[in-house]
Amino acid sequence: MTDPLLQLDYKPKLPPKINYGIGLVGTGGIVQYATMPSYRKHRLDVVAAFDLQRPTAEIVAEEFEIPHVYDSLEQLLDDAAVEIVEIAVPPQHQLGIVRTCLEAGKHLLCQKPLALDLGESAEIVKLGEASGLKVAVNQQLRWGQGLRGAKDLIRKGWIGQVADASIQVSVNTPWNMWEWLVNAPRLEIQFHSIHYIDAMRSLFGDPIWITSRHARNPLQGDIIGETKTITIMDYENDLQVLIADNHFNHSDEYFATFRFIGTKGHISGTLGAMYNYPHGQEDSLYWSGRPHYPHQKFEAKLEGKWIPDAFIGPIASLMTAIQEDGMPETNVRDNLGTLRVVEAAYMSAEQNRSIRFDEVPAIPISEQ
Ligand SMILES: NC(=O)c1ccc[n+]([C@@H]2O[C@H](COP(=O)([O-])OP(=O)(O)OC[C@H]3O[C@@H](n4cnc5c(N)ncnc54)[C@H](O)[C@@H]3O)[C@@H](O)[C@H]2O)c1
């Protein structure tokens, strides 16, 4: 029998009941190439769709056999078959939709980032907690196969105490997929590195210090926000996390790697999705560790890709929370931790200094 230490536990777990009626608000790119392919594969029950651009919703409904397309949010919420609303609109529109959906008594899966600023994000947390409904965030890289596999290896003690962790990405990102991002003053950290920050928080919790440097790239033309960033998150016990991204690497030497160095071993691998976004490839994962098999190196054969397969993670976790009356892994309060790191990264870059995590204004969320 294979040693359990060598069996990686990295796949999202669906709860026993999965036939909740899901209503989509916003049916643009991410729903088309990630959410719906993933949900169809797992036979989730998407019952309704609404998009300000009705033809977009109609195309998605036809391709994925969604029975109802509605003309307004209110109509979608009136449909009793809709139990969970999944929002996938640009973040500046999310708060108003959240408020209306919660008033209608629907559980929610929100998109990342929750909002463009911390105040609105905190408002979503407050509304979610006051509602008694389950509200999660689609921060799905936590379920990326390589990083989830690494989490399992760290948990099983393969590499001892983690001392250094890094995600380094230098790729050619197709920014034309998101026209609404061209004028975003906050770009790379707010919309992309937020995934890496969240994934690192899912492994190590909140950092103590955040240091971040941001730059543009000579090739980025009209795009006004930062597209090259380096962020360091310092933890207790001298753990340092490095997240470094460059989205304008137009050479053929591109890479998207992660690495964890522990006191007793190492884990490394690649984020396959970033090699040809959004089509990508499978992640790779390698490791070696003295505690279990001191003289061997291992390679995992991982099934699935970040896009679309990791997208089942947040919705599965939300459904589990509904059934067990628990908290989704990416619940909104937890997500606020990720957003505070994001905010600290911008403060750091703007003020040319390191920022303590608790320097980011304490947020007046629900008095419990
Ligand atoms: N989780 C991820 O990995 C990931 C990846 C890409 C994008 N996103 C997020 O998903 C969201 C959507 O991104 P996208 O790439 O699909 O954008 P998109 O522009 O392709 O699609 C957005 C859709 O929302 C619709 N819309 C806008 N406002 C609306 C409203 N008030 N009510 C109903 N529909 C509305 C638009 O008509 C459009 O069809 C953004 O918040 C983005 O940050 C997340």
Image (cartoon, rainbow, N blue to C red):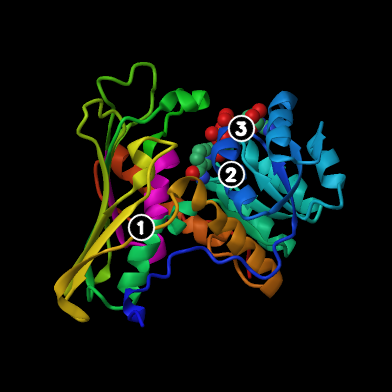
Q: Which residue is drawn at the image coordinates 62% and 36% (left, top)?
A: 89
Q: Which residue is mark 2?
A: 37
Mark 2 lies on a secondary structure that is helix
Q: Which residue is mark 3?
A: 28
Mark 3 near mark 1, Cβ–Cβ under 8 Å?
A: no
Which portion, as a residue range, is magenta?
190-213
Vertical side of 366 occupied by 224: above or below? above
Asked if residue 364 can be seen in this view, the reply is no
Q: Amino acid at mark 1?
A: Gly
Which disc, if any, is residue 131?
A: none
* Mark 3 C-beta closer than 8 Å to ligand 1: yes
Mark 1 near mark 2, Cβ–Cβ under 8 Å?
A: no
Q: Is residue 122 left or right of residue 194?
A: right
Asked if residue 34 can be seen in this view, the reply is yes
- Residue 156 position, x and y percent, is 32, 78
Q: Amino acid at mark 3?
A: Gly
Q: Most prominent secondary structure in the magenta stretch?
A: helix
